[in-house]
Image (cartoon, helix red, strand yellow):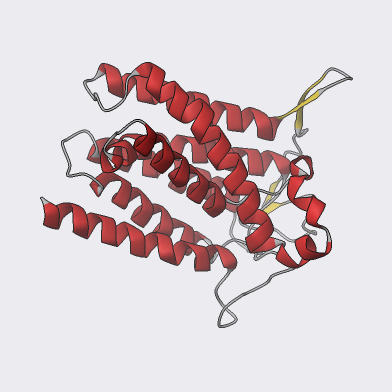
Amino acid sequence: MLTYPNINPIALDLGFIQLHWYGVMYLLAFLTAYGLGCYRIKQGHTILNREQLGDLLLFWGVLGVIIGGRLGYVLFYQFNYFLQNPAYLLKIWEGGMSFHGGLVGGILAIVLYARKHHKPMGEVFDFIAPLVPLGLFFGRLGNFINGELWGRTTDVAWGMVFPYAGEQARHATQLYEAGLEGLLLFVVLWAYSAKPRPPYAVSGLFLLAYGLIRFLLEYYREPDDHLGFVLYDSLTMGQLLSIPMIMVGIAFMIFAYKKK
């Protein structure tokens, strides 16, 4: 059994301002995506130049992910509380972001950017998709540092006792997700996108693979206390939201290869 290292969630405290590790992880996520994108441009991907990449990721993408992530969390996970306290939607500093909401927000940002600049949407999606998993890796590390989103109780040797989750050992699902949704998915997408693929194939693989990984890992992750299981007394909200991802990912790949 392992003991949670109890990391201070505040990375830097200057008195008048505090820098939280979770915010640092978001910053690292976008900067890493930008660095990887610049590398891809240098390798010959011409759908975006460095200036356009920076505009898309560091302005449109940041807005889309933050707004979508917050809206998704409030609507998917805290809807009843939101109805009673509408101002809660704006209280981002209290925490609460949804990956699936952030994904929708990011997709809408890409759609708007591609239409505004007359870029082929499928190629922009496929350029951005391999840049995302390392951002997920940093995000899950942020969850681990915050001591949140822990797993279900377990008796495996690597089970971990989290400070806010009682005295029983639990799966460190934040680290599972960092490794599988982050590092593993990055390697798969980076290798797959190294060769020419038909438009929407790379982004389709991202949606399909992430959806499957997230769906399976939810069996080890503790359901949200206020929601519990939301379907058939066995499926969590995370699994329910991953099903459309899997379906859209399959549809994208069928469309990509049939069109080819």
Question: Vertically, is 141 above or below 248?
Answer: above
Residue 244 image offset from top left, x and y in percent:
42, 64
Q: Is residue 158 visible?
A: no
Q: Residue at x 48, y 57 (%)?
A: 214
Q: Residue at x 64, y 38 (%)?
A: 142
Residue 88 image offset from top left, x and y in percent:
79, 52
Residue 98 image offset from top left, x and y in percent:
60, 51
Query: Quarter of the image holding residue 23?
Result: top right
Q: Residue at x 27, y 16 (%)?
A: 42
Relative to 220, 119 lies left or right: left
Q: As drawn, which residue projects farthest toward the left?
A: 260
Q: Is residue 241 visible?
A: yes
Question: Vertically, is 120 above or below 77?
Answer: above
Question: Vertically, is 111 above or below 169?
Answer: above
Q: As drawn, which residue projects farthest toward the right?
A: 15
Residue 54 image offset from top left, x and y in percent:
45, 22
Query: Quarter of the image holding residue 53?
Result: top left
Query: Quarter of the image holding residue 199?
Result: top left
Q: How many marks?
A: 0
Instruction: Decide which of 23, 93 is in the foreground and name it.
Output: 93
Relative to 168, 64 lies left or right: left
Relative to 199, 178 lies left or right: right
